[in-house]
Image (tube, rainbow, N blue to C red):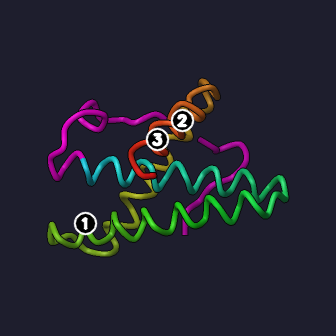
C-alpha cells in the first residue's frame, strides 16, 4: 500500500526521458509517475472527504498501477520490486510538491493528456 499523507503529498517527474519518447522505458516510467500522482490526488481527496473525486482518482490510479505492473512484469521484474518502485515515485512527487505545490496541477494535466 502506498504511504501518502497530507504533508507528504505530491512530485515532478524525476527522469528527463519521462516526458519525451515513445520507447518502452519512457512508457513504463510515465505510467509509474502518473499512477503515483493519481494515488496522491486520491489520498488528498480522501482527506477532504470528497468521495466523488476519490472515486475518479482511485479508478485512474488502479488502471495505471495495473498497466505499470504488467509492463514491469514484461521486463521480468519481481512484484516486490514493483511496489518499491511505485513508492519511490510517490516519494519523489511528494518531495517536489512540498517545494512547489503548483507542480501538482501541471503534472496532473500531463498525466490526463498521456492517459485519457
Name the residue that disc number 1 marks.
72
Residue at x 36% of width, y 35% of height: 14
Crowding at mark 2 (Cα within 10 Å: few <14, some 14-19, many 20+): some
8 relative to 79 in the view: left or right: right
Name the residue that disc number 2 marks.
95
Name the spot of residue 48 as percent of width and height, x first: 83, 52
Which of pointers 2 and 1 indicates the residue nearer the eye?
A: 1
Name the residue that disc number 3 marks.
92
Say which element carries label 3.
helix
Residue at x 64% of width, y 61% of height: 56
Q: Is residue 44 above or below residue 92?
A: below
User: Are discs 2 and 1 less than 8 Å apart at CB?
Assistant: no
Say which element carries label 2.
helix
Residue at x 43% of width, y 65% of height: 65
User: Are discs 3 and 1 less than 8 Å apart at CB?
Assistant: no
Name the spot of residue 11 as percent of width and height, x first: 51, 37
Residue 86 in magenta?
A: no
Q: Earlier in the sequence, mark 2 or mark 1?
A: 1
81 relative to 109 in the view: left or right: left
Question: Residue 66 falls in which quadrant of the image?
Answer: bottom left
Q: How far, Cα to Cα, is label 2 from label 1?
A: 24 Å
* Furthest residue in direction right, as rendered: 49
Q: Quadrant of the N terminus?
A: bottom right
Q: How far, Cα to Cα, is label 3 from label 2?
A: 5 Å
Q: Nearer the viewer, residue 105 or 15?
A: 105
Q: Which residues are magenta?
A: 1-26
Crowding at mark 1 (Cα within 10 Å: few <14, some 14-19, many 20+): many
Q: Earlier in the sequence, mark 3 or mark 1?
A: 1
Q: Is residue 95 above or below residue 56?
A: above
User: Are discs 3 and 2 less than 8 Å apart at CB?
Assistant: yes
Name the spot of residue 82 as percent of width and height, x first: 34, 66
Say which element carries label 1.
helix
Amino acid at each position: 500500500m502506498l504511504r501518502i499523507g497530507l504533508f507528504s503529498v505530491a512530485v515532478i517527474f524525476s527522469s528527463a526521458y519521462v516526458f519525451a519518447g515513445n520507447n518502452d522505458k519512457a512508457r513504463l516510467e510515465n505510467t509509474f509517475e502518473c499512477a503515483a500522482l493519481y494515488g496522491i490526488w486520491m489520498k488528498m481527496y480522501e482527506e477532504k472527504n470528497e468521495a466523488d473525486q476519490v472515486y475518479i482518482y482511485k479508478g485512474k490510479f488502479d488502471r495505471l498501477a495495473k498497466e505499470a505492473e504488467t509492463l514491469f512484469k514484461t521486463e521480468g521484474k519481481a512484484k516486490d520490486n514493483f511496489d518499491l518502485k511505485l513508492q519511490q515515485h510517490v516519494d519523489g512527487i511528494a518531495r517536489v510538491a512540498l517545494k512547489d505545490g503548483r507542480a501538482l496541477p501541471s503534472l496532473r494535466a500531463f498525466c490526463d493528456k498521456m492517459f485519457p
